[in-house]
Image: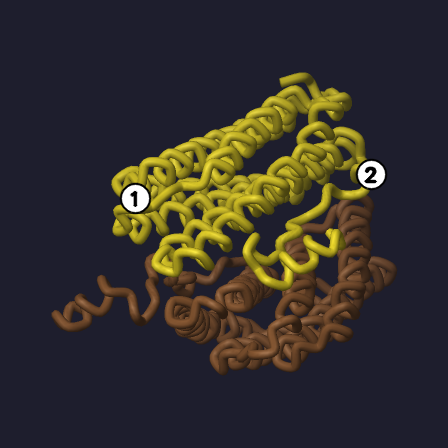
Chain colours: A yellow, B brown
Amino acid sequence: MPKSPNSHTLVAFDQELSHLDRLLVRQFELVRGMIRDAMTAVAQCDVSLARQIILRDNEVDDLEFAIENHCIKILALRSPIANDLRWVLATLKASSELERMGDFSKNIGKRIDVLSLDPNIKVNQNLQMMGVVILDQLEKLLQAWIDEKAEPTMAVWKGDEAVDALYDSTFRELLTQMTEFPLTINSNIHLLFIAKNMERLGDHITNIAEDLYYRITGQKPAADRPKADQTCSAASYTDPALMALKKEGAE
Amino acid sequence: MPKSPNSHTLVAFDQELSHLDRLLVRQFELVRGMIRDAMTAVAQCDVSLARQIILRDNEVDDLEFAIENHCIKILALRSPIANDLRWVLATLKASSELERMGDFSKNIGKRIDVLSLDPNIKVNQNLQMMGVVILDQLEKLLQAWIDEKAEPTMAVWKGDEAVDALYDSTFRELLTQMTEFPLTINSNIHLLFIAKNMERLGDHITNIAEDLYYRITGQKPAADRPKADQTCSAASYTDPALMALKKEGAE
């Protein structure tokens, strides 16, 4: 971890900030592990792995609590300013995002029980690809956090578009499948919520990238935020209204 | 607004804290208005109202930005401790929750376009009841924030169970309808996501109640958190596996 620009005469303060960073990196790694296992549990309908993920969420919550307390201690006793204040605030926010990411992974894990009851369950390829992209984004974000580099942070921030595009395709495919094969509705609804959880994981990665960019530069990213979920107005590929529009070339 | 227990000799500091509170109450009121209109837009499939909600989200985001900047200024210039530090941190967190609640309301608004295309759309009564309960919870939370009272804050914190129970019923009813009438899938999927957004609104109200309780008492609520979404393992009322379980009296 590079030294903070305002090098402290108070060694104890430096140590407190380093300890804060270690806690956050630990939380990052835990969440990354949960997401990785959640993807495997979905692909293989692995109920036992899913149950492990659910149990591990407590550790993520405990870390958020420890990080929050450590931040409050630093704010109260050290009255940090400038770069150090940004460090503490960005960590506080990022830790809260990671806690939610743990919740989403747990939520994915909870849905495996139902999916495992369906012998014909087929996990959409775009959904699996979402998992690959999210894990790659998270890996790059963790590295950018450790290196405190603005450029790779912005690359992660912009990278959420790929997750959104895959979510859009997954949404439409699952909806089409449900419309064509109503017997698949129960399982596909849960896959749809899993996809939505993954899309939200991508949003939280974007939020942490914003926190980190602020920590490094003192600014919010200047560009427009990558577009969010576009499926709010989406219909299935077989929807008559949509097909009519397609024929008219209105799309 | 009652005076902070640590009454300040610095009048300017008191004014800064009061200004912070005014900004947060304004953000609260904006989000409450968005949720109220989102409920109306869903019930009446009102596309024009839905578009207004979407536009108003920018104002909520701007307020979050203003609150965050004001908090950073106070932290950097006043180095608050004890009760004042909690006040600033709780406001920072609550504002971020409200920003997300604005996003959820906007997301509900965005789905009205698709719903309005379906002439046979029927909005589930439990879904409408969720809206009523959420608005009531939000009203009580705002009052508790203004009064700085721990007891009504805990009542709001515990009240999320009612929202979760209504979400659970809505989820099962929509799933059943889709299974029985596959032509309703497109609309019902969007209603399902609206219900999920509303359940998340309830979660964020609980989070703000936790922030407020911390601001008032310096503690997190001691009791277990109200149970979260139980639909992860839910099936429709016509699901054969579920019906078999019912017959066996295993439910």
Kindly report the distance in space between the C-alpha atoms of the residues bearing marks 1 and 2. 40 Å
SS at badge 2: loop
Q: Compare residues B14 and A159 and report the one nearer the observer.
A: A159
Labelled disc at residue A72: none
Q: Compare residues B2 and A63 and report the one nearer the observer.
A: A63
- Residue drawn at the location 48% of the way across and 68% of the way down: B183
Q: Is residue B125 left or right of residue B172?
A: right
Q: Is residue A237 above or below residue A31?
A: below
Q: Is residue A22 visible?
A: yes
Q: Compare residues A166 and A102 and report the one nearer the observer.
A: A166
SS at badge 1: helix
The residue to which callout 2 is attached is A223
- Residue drawn at the location 54% of the way across and 50% of the way down: A171
Amino acid at dot 2: Ala
The residue to which callout 1 is attached is A51
Q: Compare residues A150 and B245 and report the one nearer the observer.
A: B245
Number of disc labels = 2
> Dot 2 falls on which chain?
A
Quarter of the rendering containing residue A33: top left
Amino acid at dot 1: Arg
Q: Is residue B81 above or below residue A205?
A: below
